[in-house]
Amino acid sequence: METNHWIKIADDENSLQWNENGIALVSIENKEICIIKTTEGLHACNEKCPHAGAPLEVTGSVDSHCILTCSRHHYKFNLKRGRDAFNEGYFLKVYPVRKEADGIYINFR
Ligand code: FES
């Protein structure tokens, strides 16, 4: 049985430290997670690129289709599904994000 594990990460978007690519880094249970602003709302994923471990808060940029590109070797990942956009077998762990009146939560499972 899957358990939901929603964790509050911030009171609101303004309390996160966004870089110029709209990515903020948060630490949850000793794990670094990228929170990413997209045209379809907030997304969350592991901080390490699944190709060769680049720090996505530095190497990541997102387009208007929720595709995250890692600038290290230019692999692309769909932030909705985690799959690499060209089906080369890499999978970026993504987490559901929800905004509530009292803050922003991610489902960290
Ligand atoms: S480390 Fe990200 S594409 Fe290679």
Image: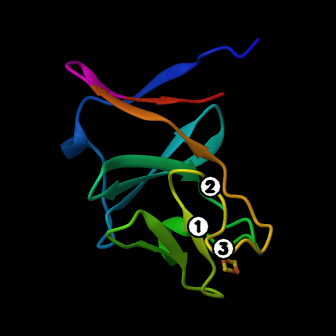
Mark 2 falls on what kind of element?
Answer: loop
Task: Look at mark 1 in the image and give the residue it sits on.
Answer: 77
Ligand 1 in which quarter: bottom right
Q: Nearer the viewer, mark 1 or mark 3?
A: 1
Residue appearing at x 59%, y 51% in the figure: 81
Q: Is residue 13 above or below residue 88?
A: above
Q: Say above or below: 60 vs 46.
A: below
Between disc 2 and disc 1, whose residue precedes?
1
Q: Which residue type does callout 3 highlight?
A: Ala
Q: Quadrant of residue 18?
A: bottom left
Q: Mark 3: which secondary structure?
A: loop
> In the rendering, at what x and y percent does residue 82 appear?
62, 55
**Badge 1 amino acid:** Phe
Q: Which residue is mark 3?
A: 54
Per the rendered image, the range of residues in magenta is 100-104
From this view, report whether residue 53 is shown above or below residue 32. below
Q: CA distance from mark 1 to mark 3?
A: 13 Å
Q: Judge whether residue 105 is colored magenta.
A: no
